[in-house]
Amino acid sequence: MKALIFNGPGQSEWTDVPDPGIEEATDVVVRVDAVTICGTDLHILKGDVPEVRPGTVLGHEAVGEVVEVGGDVRTVRPGDRVLVSCITACGRCRFCREGGYGQCRGGGGWILGHLINGTQAEFVRVPHADLSVHPLPGALDSKDAVLLADIFPTAYEVGVLNGRVRPGDTVAVVGAGPVGLAAIATAQLYTPQKIIAVDPAPARLDAAKRFGADAVASAVGDEAELLVADLTEGLGADVVIEAVGIPESFEMCTRMVRPGGHVANVGVHGKPATLHLEDLWIKNVTITTGLVDTSSTPTLLRMMAAGRLPASSMVTHRFPLDRMEEAYDVFSRAADTGALKVVLGGQPHDTVAVREATPAT
């Protein structure tokens, strides 16, 4: 089969690799129908995630069809259309029994495209399938469903829930990429008073408005901090969600939050960030970090099937699976290309309201 292989920092290749097979009785093999590229994949290619070894198939988000199941799998069978979660859960260890699947100690957690071969391929082996793949309603398009593999659960759990968004809050979301937009969308479930989006790219600020942001500001200079101060009478935001993963954005978040407020860090950081405890110690600020557990995926699936999540408007570019390298180029240059979420593959009926990518000239 064909797959995108990580060959070291700055190096990847769409090439032939062996087909995956069942290795454990709890495995399934899925034929990939639709897959997407995550900002974490860009961090891996930059060398920010050293655990990823050269030769690994990248990717941790997919929708596809089950083609083979291990003898102990009970929840799906060949022919089922499924969502492949970015998090794998054994279901037996302490953390899984508490719903903390991201910290699984039984061979799960974030392993796809990280510690084992991932989803940016024609086929993928998924361990611990009973908790790690989700059957999909027939009416849910692949290009929408694939956003539930990582983007929406991550934004909702690590951003909105960890940040403890409550009715009447002022919420600032720093970073209006896919995760930031999903945070804006899911924060509205808790009826905040206002949502402020911060990003350096005007196109992404426009997208933030479409997703429900009440005010937007550039991340360049001190515009965002001044806007948050102005809209909160100098107090600061109740909740600030960091959805970028660079030191400057994290430090900006800590300056925007009010005393007693919450900073929810979602972004994947590849470099140290300074924690200014000389300013923060007296403010009773709570800072949370975390890897998504995807325990909310069944709920979000029901909401998306009911049309309650704005998924389609996030997908700006579509490519066939074999144009993976071109898709990476478009996604990595989002400021120039306007890319929010790039989806590869998908059935022909999935093309409604999606900007099709044209061949490079």
Image (cartoon, helix red, strand yellow):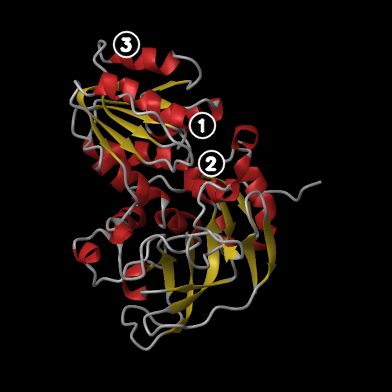
Badge 3 is on which residue? 230
Tell me the kind of residue under disc 3. Asp
**Do the residues bearing badges 1 and 2 touch, measured as CB atoms within 8 Å?**
yes
36 up-or-down from 67: above or below: above
The residue sitting at 51% across, 46% down in the picture is 39
Q: Position of residue 73 (x, y in %)?
A: 34, 82
Above or below: residue 272 compared with residue 99: above
| Image quadrant in which you'd find residue 195 | top left
Q: Secondary structure at mark 1?
A: helix
Give the percent coordinates (x, y) of residue 139.
42, 63
> Residue 51 location, x and y as percent?
49, 57
Please tell me in which quadrant of the rendered image residue 269 appears: top left
**Where is mark 2, residue-wise?**
340
The furthest residue to the right: 361
Tell me the kind of residue under disc 1.
Arg
Q: Earlier in the sequence, mark 3 or mark 1?
A: 1
The residue tagged 1 is 204
Tell me which numbered mark, 1 or 2, is placed earlier along the sequence: 1
Q: Secondary structure at mark 2?
A: loop
Q: Is residue 24 left or right of residue 277?
A: right
* Residue 169 coordinates in the image, percent (x, y): 22, 27
Residue at point 26%, 11% (across, down): 234
Q: Verify CB contact (< 8 Å) between mark 2 and mark 3.
A: no
Q: Residues within 10 Å of mark 2 (few under 14, many from 20)?
A: many
